[in-house]
Image (cartoon, rainbow, N blue to C red):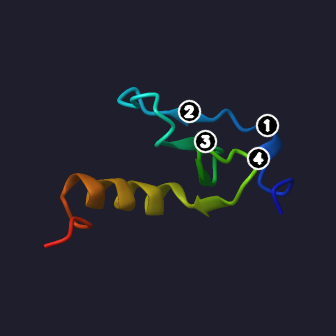
Amino acid sequence: MTEQIGLARAEWRKSSHSSGDGQCVEVAFLGAVVAVRDSKDPDGPVLVSTPGEFSAFVRGLLDGEFTPA
């Protein structure tokens, strides 16, 4: 599956707000898909979504949609 979506050629990026303590995620923009992985486990599982789904997720984060009440 990873070969099908081009993860071998992915250019993974961390947020510029990353503190460097290993508690981050990395994202790769691969045209038709966006991939996200745990920076501590680069060979581990990868979440894949469409660019629209990823944008909606980021908007939800910024709007506090996932913050516990």
Structural crowding at the residue carrying mark 3, measured as other residues with C-alpha within 10 Å and reported as few (<14), some (14–19) or many (≥20): some
Residue at disc 2, secondary structure: strand
* Residue at 72% over, 38% down: 10
Q: CA distance from mark 1 to mark 4?
A: 5 Å
Report the amino acid beneath label 3: Ala
Q: CA distance from mark 3 to mark 1?
A: 10 Å
Report the amino acid beneath label 4: Leu
For disc 3, the marked residue is 28
Q: Is residue 27 above or below residue 5?
A: above
Residue at disc 4, secondary structure: helix
Report the amino acid beneath label 1: Arg
Structural crowding at the residue carrying mark 2, measured as other residues with C-alpha within 10 Å and reported as few (<14), some (14–19) or many (≥20): few
Image quadrant in which you'd find residue 60: bottom left
- Image marks 3 and 4: residues in contact by CB distance under 8 Å: yes
* Residue at 67% over, 33% down: 11
* Residue at 86% over, 53% down: 3
Among numbered discs 3 and 4, the one appearing first in the sequence: 4
- Image marks 3 and 2: residues in contact by CB distance under 8 Å: yes
For disc 4, the marked residue is 7
For disc 2, the marked residue is 13
For disc 1, the marked residue is 9
Q: Is residue 20 toward the left or the right of residue 38 in the image? A: left
